[in-house]
Structure formats: structure tokens, C-alpha cells
Amino acid sequence: MELDSSLLLHEERLETAAEWSFPAPGWTFAWLLSGDGYLMGCNPARAMGAGAVAVHGGGIRLTLRASRLGPVRFRWFRLEPSALFGVFTLFERRRIDHPEDSEPPLPWVLEGGTPAARRFAGVEPSRGASALEQRAHLLELVSVVLSPPPFTSGIPVGSPRDAGDRLEELLHRITDSELMTLPVEELARRCRCEPRRLLSIYRERFGESLPGQQREWRRLRACALLAQPGTDITTVARACGYDGVDAFRAWFRREFGMAPSQWRERGQANATGVDSRAIR
């Protein structure tokens, strides 16, 4: 397992004036256990005291520098959105997939003593706890910081709802994985409208096509799973909405110009320093 794997808790120590670079891409959450430090790379630099939490979504090179008064101890973990499907809704994933649109702009510093920062301070390395329990705890912290406001329908109770209202309510409930594999015809049926009308509403609301969004997520999902050692092709195919392996292979070849096995071999070759152009 790589040292910066998603949802893996680390503890580090920085000596006086030493620096640590935030990994990229993906989101990183780092909080100080003791000492004082500075976030360098943002303008202006940000001071951090014990208990403060730094939240970074990539985009710029960011470092944590210990002050000249003493060392810093901190814990951190990453979240790689492309590696996690079946948890977020469309609205949650749009927020997580586009950190450049965050308000206020990243990075954020959550001061120690705030409710969110106190949640981070209580996280301990998993001694005796299962890895799943630890990941679930870290994902809970992600939700504390990145969850959009709770959805509240603006339609009064008892008032008629049109297809757009039903679509919005549905997209606040189903996960990205469900939306990725849901046929347009079935989604239209749930919204009580024609498929053409549904596609028009989706484009009006989100500025892009629903099939295009499904295709993007399917590509990300396939690559993320193929990059995991030991994942069999049947599991990847099913996760991407295909009942048969042959249909998945045909789709993957159309999308990437190679078979899934070739894509995996090239990724492994790149990771080990082998020239992927030599693999045919």
C-alpha cells in the first residue's frame, strides 16, 4: 500500500523549521497535535496552532512548515474521490470533484476549538480497531467538512411537483454509483416524464449531459478499480454496470483504445519505471 493511500491515517513529526509537502492530487486533511506551524504556498501564508486543521484540495503546491520555536506533531490523511464510489450523491460528488470552486477558496484552516476541529482531535490511529472502522471514521470527518447543506425542498407540502422537482429530490438521495448505471429511461420513469424531457432538464440544471456525466464516472470507476492490485475483471465490469465481461471489455476498448489488461499492465509498468511504450 502506498504511503499516501486514500483514507489511511498517518502521524508525522517535523523538526524546527522543517517542511512537509501536502500530497496531490486529491483532498488532504492535516491537523496539529502539538507545536505551531505555517501553511506555505498560499497567499498569504497561514499560521496554525495546536488543534488547528488544514484542508487542501490540490491545485497548488502547499507545505506545512514548523515554526522556529520547536517541532510539530500532526496527523493527516487523504481522500481520492475517484477511488470512492457508491457513497456520495451527485451534489456531494460535484462539490468534492471540483475543489477549485470551493468558497472560500482553498486551503482552509479550521481553528482549534471549533466543533469540526475537535472532531479531528479525537481521532487516534487504529490500535485494535479494524481498518474498515478507521476508514469509516475518517470518511465521517470528510462529511463534517465537505457535506453540502441538507436538502430541503422549496415546494410546500401538498403542492404539485413537476419532473424537475422530482429529479432534484431523487438526485439528493441516490448515490453516484446508482446514477452512473441507471438507464435514462428508468430515471425518466421515476420522474414521470419522457426521456427527452429528462435529458433537457438535467442539462438546464447542471450545464452538461447526463450520458456524458455517466460516461465520465464510468471511466473513472473502471480505472480506479483496475489500478487496485488483485481486482478481477468480473468485479470491475459489474461495478461499472455491465453484466458480462465481454461487453465491458468492448466498451473499455472503445473508450481507451486498449483492453483492460493492457491498461493495467501499462499502469504497473509506469509504477515500476518500465517504459510503457514497450508493452504492446
Image (cartoon, grey):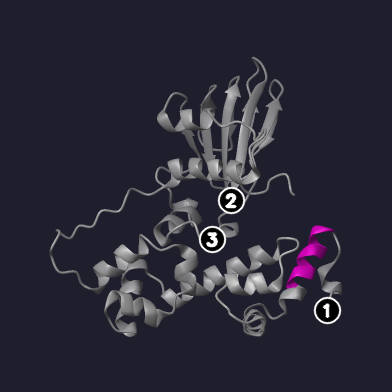
The secondary structure type at the circle numbered 3 is: loop
Q: Nearer the viewer, mark 3 or mark 1?
A: 3
Drawn side of residue 191 relative to residue 17, left or right:
left
One can see residue 275 in this view? yes
Residue at mark 2: 26
Answer whether labels 3 and 1 touch (C-beta < 8 Å): no
Q: Amino acid at mark 1?
A: Arg
Q: Position of residue 52 (x, y in %)?
A: 51, 27
Q: Which residues are magenta?
A: 263-272
Q: Which mark is residue 85?
A: 3
Q: Quadrant of residue 219?
A: bottom right
Badge 1 crowding class, 10 Å Cα cut-off, few under 14, some 14 to 19, many 20 or more, is few
Q: Position of residue 27 (x, y in %)?
A: 56, 47
Q: Amino acid at mark 2?
A: Gly
One can see residue 110 in this view? no
Location of residue 79 with respect to 235 vertically, above or below: above
Q: Is residue 226 magenta?
A: no
Q: Amino acid at mark 3?
A: Phe
Q: Main secondary structure of the magenta part?
A: helix
The secondary structure type at the circle numbered 1 is: loop
Q: Is residue 268 magenta?
A: yes
Location of residue 101 with respect to 46 vertically, above or below: below
Residue at mark 1: 280
Badge 3 crowding class, 10 Å Cα cut-off, few under 14, some 14 to 19, many 20 or more, is some
Drawn side of residue 134 relative to residue 228, left or right:
left
Q: Quadrant of residue 201?
A: bottom left
- Of mark 3 and mark 1, the one earlier in the sequence is 3
Q: Position of residue 2 (x, y in %)?
A: 74, 48
Badge 2 crowding class, 10 Å Cα cut-off, few under 14, some 14 to 19, many 20 or more, is some
Q: Quadrant of residue 220?
A: bottom right
